[in-house]
Image: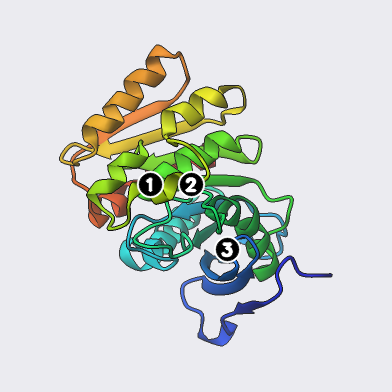
Amino acid sequence: MSSAFRTIKLTDPRFERDGLRHVTVKSAALGQRADLSLFLPVEGRGVSDLPVVILLHGVYGSHWSWALNAGAHLTAARMIAAGEIPPLVLAMPSDGLWGDGSAYLPHLEQDFEKWIVEEVPLAAAEASELVSTESSLFIAGLSMGGFGALRLGAKFGERFGGISAHSSITKLEHLEDFVEESIDCYQAVEKEPNVLSAILQYRNILPPLRFDCGEQDSLLMANRDLHRALEEAEIAHSYQEFPGGHEWPYWEAHLEESLRFFGAQL
């Protein structure tokens, strides 16, 4: 079987812990090596097409962020063991490591969108016998990763069985508060990308959608605005607010909402 990648490197199973496997591939979309971490549940052994949840990190982060800042793999393992959700794989890629954050957008010379939507599922399938090209896909993220999940989940709705986002940036200009790079750099391929326009444009293929935000989060008003706009457009979705700010304890606690939501779609 030929590989979708020129090179792919996996961690040695002898040194893997808590179901985590780390993967590095040569990405054609990025023109460089790129990393992802996988959570592979023991309950999935013997199954070749487990559902895959792609978890997107925020600015400054990388493929290890969800696991080592929020224990995402431990949350998934606990919920699977308790029967709260069916066995599933977490695929936690880097955003491509452009600047302070790529926003998961196609740039002129590197396609961070294609890396996530096309190459990450292929890398997961090559890196684990629990995943195949027939595996159901779901997408979630936090902050910049929420922007990516909402936008990519809408644009490529035929590929995903559900979308969930936490504390999301909803418009590209919100990134100005977080990154050093000029926003103009992000608009080289797609003019003024934002979550609402993507959802409205692709509403006919929109998969089940939920998002939430902390009541002390600086992005709260933007998320409320998105919620109201979706209500006015009569687009089905679920929106929740919880105590907390733009911080890892919030995302660690509320990843459960995403996983339960995806489990319900299965």
Badge 2: residue crowd in 10 Å (few <14, some 14–19, many ≥20)? some
Q: Is residue 142 visible?
A: no
- Residues at discs 1 and 2 in contact (Cβ within 8 Å): yes
137 displayed left or right of 246: right
In the image, residue 83 lies at what x, y percent? 50, 49
Q: Is residue 232 above or below residue 114?
A: above
Residue situated furthest right in the rendering: 1
From mark 1 to mark 2, how far is it between C-alphas? 7 Å
From mark 3 to mark 1, how far is it between C-alphas? 19 Å
Q: Residue placed at 46% from the left, 38% from the top?
A: 150
- Residues at discs 2 and 3 in contact (Cβ within 8 Å): no
**Helix, strand or loop under label 2:** loop
Q: Which residue is disc 3 drawn over? A: 30
Q: Residue placed at 43% from the left, 55% from the top?
A: 102
Numbered circles on residues, count: 3
Q: Amino acid at mark 1?
A: Asp
Observer-nearest of 165 and 194: 194
Q: Which residue is disc 1 drawn over? A: 184
Q: Residue placed at 70% from the left, 69% from the top?
A: 5
In the image, residue 211 lies at what x, y percent? 38, 35
Observer-nearest of 18 and 193: 193
| Nearer-N-terminus badge (2/3) | 3
From mark 2 to mark 3, how far is it between C-alphas? 15 Å
Q: Amino acid at mark 3?
A: Leu
Q: Which residue is disc 2 drawn over? A: 188
Q: Is residue 73 above or below residue 52?
A: below
